[in-house]
Image (tube, helix red, strand yellow):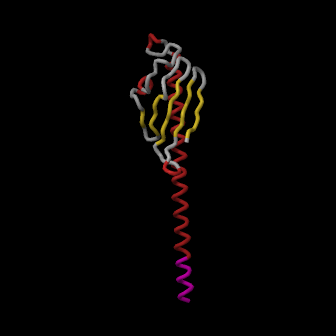
Amino acid sequence: MGQQQLLLIILGVIIVGIAVAVGITMFQDNALSASRDAMTADLVNLASKAQQYYRKPASLGGGGNSFAGITAVTVLVGQAVATNDNATYSVDGTPSATSIVFVGTGATEGAGGVLPVHMVTVAPSTYTISQVE
C-alpha cells in the first residue's frame, strides 16, 4: 500500500509541474501577442497623426500637403524618439513629400530573445503596416 501511495504522489507532482510549465508558456505567448497588437495600434495612431500633419496648411503648423517637414516623431508627439510600454518609435530615413515610414521596435522579447519590429508606411490617404523579424 505504501508504494502505491508514493507512486500517486510522484505522479501528482509531475502532472502539476507540467501544468505550471504550460501555463507559464501560454502567459508569455499572450504577453507577446498583446504587446504586438498594442504596438500596431500605436503605429496606426502615428500614421493618422502624420496624415493630419500632411493635410494641415503650413501656415497652421502643418505640412501643407507634404510629409517632408516631419524630421522626427517630434512633430507628432513632442519628442525625437517616442517610447512607451509597448515599443520605441522613430522615423525611418528621410520623409518625402508623399510618404513617411515609422518604425516600432517592441519592448517584449519574442522567440530567441528577438524584439519584434513593425513598420508603417504612410501615404496621403493610406498606410501599410508590415512586420519585420
The residue segment tinted magenta is 1-10
Q: Residue at x 56, y 70 (%)?
A: 15
List the single residue furthest toward the front: 93
Q: How many marks?
A: 0
Q: Please identify the quadrant where the C terminus is shown.
A: top right
- Residue 25 x/y as whole percent: 53, 57
Q: Residue furthest top?
A: 59
Asked if 12 appears above or below 121 in the picture, the reply is below
Q: Residue at x 47, y 40 (%)?
A: 86
Is 123 displayed left or right of 62 in the figure?
A: right
Provide residue 34's location: percent of width, then percent of height. Answer: 53, 45
How far from the left and from the top, in percent, is residue 120? 55, 31
**Dominant secondary structure of the residues highlighted in magenta in the image:** helix
Vertical comparison of 88 with 121: above or below: below
Q: Is residue 84 magenta?
A: no
Whether 29 is drawn above or below 15: the answer is above
Which residue shows up at 57% across the image and 38% down it?
131
Q: Which residue is at the far left? A: 79
Residue drawn at x 53%, y 51% as measured from the top left: 111
Percent across and percent down for residue 106 are 48, 41
Image height check: is 73 above or below 132?
A: above
- Give the quadrant of the N terminus: bottom right
**Viewer-proximal residue among 124 and 72:** 72
